[in-house]
Amino acid sequence: MRVCVIGTGYVGLVTGACLAHIGHDVICVDNNEEKVKLMKSGQSPIFEPGLSEIMQSAIQAEKIHFTSDLAAGVAHGEVLFIAVGTPPLPTGESDTRYVEAVARGIGENLNGGYKVIVNKSTVPIGSGDWVRMLVLDGVAERQKTLVPAGGVASNEKLPEFAAEFDVISNPEFLREGSAVHDTFNPDRIVLGGNSQRAVGLMRQLYAPIVERKYAVDQSLPPVPILATDLSSAEMIKYAANAFLATKISFINEVANICDRVGADVTQVAKGIGLDSRIGNKFLQAGIGWGGSCFPKDVSALIHTADDYGYEAQLLKSAVSVNERQRLIALEKLQKVLKILKGKTIGLLGLTFKPDTDDLRDAPALNLIEQLNRLGAKVKAFDPIVSQTGLRHGLSGVLVETDAERLADGCDALVLVTEWQQFSTLDYVKMAKLMAHPVIIDGRNFLDPEAMIRAGFQYVGVGR
Ligand SMILES: NC(=O)C1=CN([C@@H]2O[C@H](COP(=O)(O)OP(=O)(O)OC[C@H]3O[C@@H](n4cnc5c(N)ncnc54)[C@H](O)[C@@H]3O)[C@@H](O)[C@H]2O)C=CC1
Ligand SMILES: O=C(O)[C@H]1O[C@H](OP(=O)(O)OP(=O)(O)OC[C@H]2O[C@@H](n3ccc(=O)[nH]c3=O)[C@H](O)[C@@H]2O)[C@H](O)[C@@H](O)[C@@H]1O
């Protein structure tokens, strides 16, 4: 099928490349010319495991093209994905101005032939109908430009162009760091909307994925497709993220109690996770959740509830537990080192999770700010950011090129991100290079006994 994906970030580019990989003809549109240039040359502007490979093979097979020309993308696609960002406003609401611009732009460029407009961006509940209205506004704007100078005589007809389309909500559940894998191995596909025709086309689009043709385990039953109304699909996205974020806040609260009573939260998580009603995933206690979605989506849902006169108390608590948790490493450093002024603290990892280059709302950023405020010097090593540091505009932190340089002269290390390579560092050597061999394991990632044997004073979260 002919597909146009508008917005080539973590969601748009992965969606476009994966759809091209399974045989669709894809045009990816982005208004960032530099990104488009980079992608045309076969390079991914983001770090996501497996993405460059499928991008390059799709480029070679001429299944994917990149452009900044929205009109060309709209003309090409039978299915038009909106995958632009919806970042948080200071009030907690989503900033939907990019979706708005794209929806109007689609309307202004509709060129005849039926189109399915797919909201893949995470958008406030009710946005499906709003997008429809904006597309129609765009169509009306375009109609105005078709009126010849001097107006149209009453017996003359305006030039016609079709604007036959439906809007579908197709929320995205991929995780950064495993986005390509998640796209080919989804737990479910949600399609919200009341047009059978549009839902039918979306089923056709996703058929190879539904049939597990690109799955790690091809013997699994087909991926369930849940067809709902628009608002329910939009709510499913927010509810899923809010539930997962709350689950992490829950285990972090338990970890804080474990710290006080001398229990081990990793054992507790195992013990409760074996109950199939609870499940063992998303029970890793640590320094809190971050990233571009959990914080913004939970805030947006609280805001929506507020708009409708309902106080989302549980969600508010999940957020406040998380805000406190994101400073737990600081508390632990103060407990061990007492005064932080004049001390050097080394951060192992900066990104909000491993296998991504994304620093949006990363717990490391709070930590850097607070350590700077308390007069500590902050250094960091991150496998990706150390290579691309300048691009991220980090301030208040000296980014080192390897873990041993990082350890040199530090009064303590904090493991912020559980990059796999941090499990095999030469901790004996690192301990010797440090002024005080203290490690705060913010992700309970390391083996406490091995760290003690390496010469460290080890402090975990709730263990
Ligand atoms: N990052 C993630 O893991 C997930 C994100 N989402 C949602 O998907 C949406 C996109 O998120 P990301 O991919 O992270 O965003 P992103 O910020 O990485 O990418 C957005 C892209 O849209 C482009 N853009 C903005 N305005 C445009 C316009 N008028 N025309 C063409 N391109 C335009 C930007 O240049 C950028 O490349 C958000 O609503 C987010 O909440 C949903 C699931 C997972
Ligand atoms: O809407 C989105 O953007 C996406 O948000 C999350 O994906 P992502 O933010 O990429 O990464 P996660 O693996 O969910 O981790 C989010 C945060 O929670 C933290 N986390 C995760 C799991 C856990 O057990 N403990 C924990 O502290 C991570 O360190 C990270 O800071 C969801 O998992 C995706 O389903 C969703 O599509």
Image (cartoon, rainbow, N blue to C red):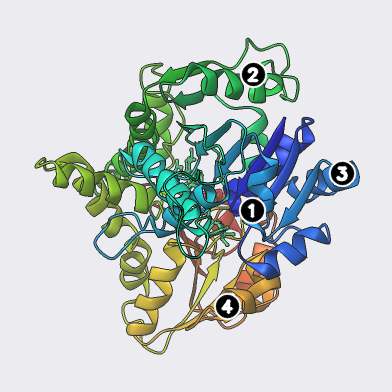
- Mark 3–mark 4 Cα distance, whole angstroms, equals 53 Å
Q: Which mark is residue 71?
A: 1
Of the residues shown, which amino acid type is indicated by label 3? Answer: Glu
Q: Is residue 22 above or below residue 44?
A: above
Which element carries disc 4, helix, strand or loop?
Answer: loop
- Mark 2–mark 1 Cα distance, whole angstroms, equals 31 Å
Residue at position x 71%, y 24% from top? Answer: 215
Earlier in the chain: of badge 4 and badge 1, it is 1
Quadrant where the N terminus sits is: top right
* Residue 226 position within the rendered picture, expressed as x and y whole percent measured from the top left: 46, 18
Question: Left or right: where does residue 183 sit relative to residue 164?
Answer: right
* Residue carrying label 3: 62
- The nearer-to-camera label among 2 and 4 is 2
Of the residues shown, which amino acid type is indicated by label 4? Answer: Met
* Residue carrying label 2: 210
Q: Looking at the image, which residue sits at the far left?
A: 309
* Residue carrying label 4: 434
Of the residues shown, which amino acid type is indicated by label 2? Answer: Val
- The nearer-to-camera label among 3 and 4 is 3
Which element carries disc 1, helix, strand or loop?
Answer: helix
Earlier in the chain: of badge 2 and badge 1, it is 1
Question: Left or right: where does residue 301 sit relative to residue 84?
Answer: left
- Mark 3–mark 2 Cα distance, whole angstroms, equals 24 Å
